[in-house]
Image (cartoon, rainbow, N blue to C red):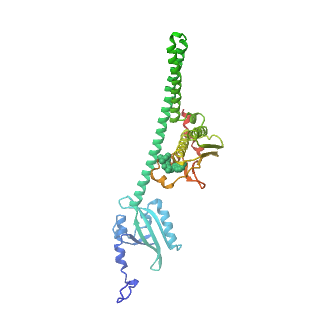
Amino acid sequence: MAPPDRPPIEFRDIPFQGIIEQSLAGVYLVFDERFQYVNATFAEMFGYTRDEFVGTSIRDLVLPDFVGEAMEYYRLRVQEGVPSIRYFTHCKHRDGHTVHIEVHGARVDYHGQPALAGVVIDVSERVRRDQDLQRSRRRLRELASYLNSSREELRGQLAREVHDVLGGMLSSIKLDVFRIQRRVSDPALAEIREITEDLLPLIQDTIDTARQISDELRPRMLDTLGLVAAMRSELEAFGRRNEIVVGFTVEGGEPALSMETATECFRVFQEALTNIGRHADAATVEVCVHNRDGRFEMQVRDDGKGIDRSSMREGSIGMLSMAERARTIGGSLYVNARAGGGTVVLLAVPGYMGRRSNDRTADR
Ligand SMILES: Nc1ncnc2c1ncn2[C@@H]1O[C@H](COP(=O)(O)OP(=O)(O)O)[C@@H](O)[C@H]1O
Ligand SMILES: [Mg+2]
C-alpha cells in the first residue's frame, strides 16, 4: 500500500529498463526474425556480449532440427496473432555445446509493426538432470532384467544337474540294492536282507526329494507341457498345501510363448500365489488364463482381506519384481483390491507373437 502522503505510483514511473538490464532471465525483442534487443543475461547464455548478439537471426541460434518448430511459433504470433506461446527448444552456444531453454514470448508492437518480445530461461541443468535420471533408471531396469535372467539360467542348470545327474546316480544305487536283495534269499544272510529292505524306501524318498528340489528350481512341466499346464499343477499343489479352494479356467488353450516369456509369467504367478498364502487369509483362489490373438492374460483373484496400498509402498520387493518381470517381456502388471474384498493380480502380455524370434526353446 502506498503511504497516504505520496501519490500512487504510475506505470510510466517504473524503471523498466533498469529492471530488464538486471534481470536474471534473458529478455529479447525480435523483429523480422532477428534479435533487435537482448539483455546481458540473454547474450551471455549463448556466450556473446549484447553488441555481438544483436542482429543474429533465430535461425542461426536454434539447432537445425528445431528451427522449423521455432519459426512456426514465431509465425503464429507475429502473423496469426496468437498472443503468447511458451515452449522448450534447443540452441547452440558459441563454444558448440547445446543450451536448452524455455521460451515465453508474446506479440508486441514495434514501430507500428508486429514483433516478438519475451523472456528465456536456461533449463540445461534441469534437462541434464532429467537425462541422467532416465539413464540411471534405464540401467537399473537393465540390471534387474539381467539379474532375473541369470538367476533363471542358474536355476535351470541346477535343476538339470539335480534331476539328471543326482537322480541318475540314485536310480543306479536303487538297482544295485535290488540286485543285492535278490542274492540274499539264503536265511543265513537274513540280516543283510533286512538292511536292504530298510534301504530301498529310503532311497526312493531321496529320489523323490531330489525330483522335488529340481522341480522347485525349475518346473520341468514348464519346458515339457507349457505354461498353462505348469500353472495348473502349481495351483493344485498350492491349494492342497494351504487348504484353499482353487479354480482354474483357460480360454484359448496353451499360448505359443517364448521360453523367456513363459518363465517370467510363471514366476509372476508363483509370487502372486506366495503372497496369497502369506498375506491374504483367503478361502478361495480363482485363476483365469486368457489367450487370444497373440494377447496373453493371466488373472489371479483371491477373496482374502484385500491389499493395503500403504503396505505395498514400503518395501514391496515381491511387487517390484513382478512388475519388473512383466516389463521385461513387454507386458503390464496390475494389482488391485477387489470391490467385494480380496485382491486381483492381472498380468497382460500383448502381442507376444511378434517376439517369437527370441524363442529359446529352439536352442534346446
Ligand atoms: N493377495 C494379497 N492379499 C493381501 N495383501 C497382499 C496380497 N499380496 C500382497 N499383499 C500385501 O502387499 C505387501 C507387499 O507384497 P510383496 O512385495 O510381495 O512383499 P512380501 O510378500 O515380501 O511382504 C505384502 O506385505 C502384503 O501386505
Ligand atoms: Mg511377496
Q: Position of residue 121 (x, y in %)?
A: 40, 66
User: Residue 157: where, in percent of width, then height?
Assistant: 48, 32
Q: Is residue 32 visible?
A: no
Q: Between residues 360 and 203, which one lies in front from this camera angle?
A: 203
For residue 34, above or below residue 182: below
Q: Position of residue 330 (x, y in %)?
A: 54, 47
Where is 265 relative to 199, above or below? below
Depth check: 137 or 232 in front? Answer: 232
Quarter that holds the N terminus: bottom left
Report the residue at 56% width, 54% height from top: 337
- Quarter of the image holding residue 12? bottom left
Q: Is residue 307 left or right of residue 251?
A: left
Q: How many marks?
A: 0
The quadrant of the image that shows the C terminus is top right
Q: Nearer the viewer, residue 286 or 130?
A: 286
Left or right of 215 in this view: 55 = left
Q: Nearer the viewer, residue 198 or 209?
A: 198
Picture coordinates of residue 7, whole percent (x, y): 37, 88
Seen at 45% across and 69% down, the residue is 104
User: Please, which residue is most extreme toward the bottom here?
Assistant: 5
Q: Is residue 64 visible?
A: yes
Q: Give the residue at x 45% y 60%.
A: 64
Is residue 48 positioned above or below 307 on the image?
below
Q: Relative to 59, does residue 252 appear above or below in the rendering? A: above
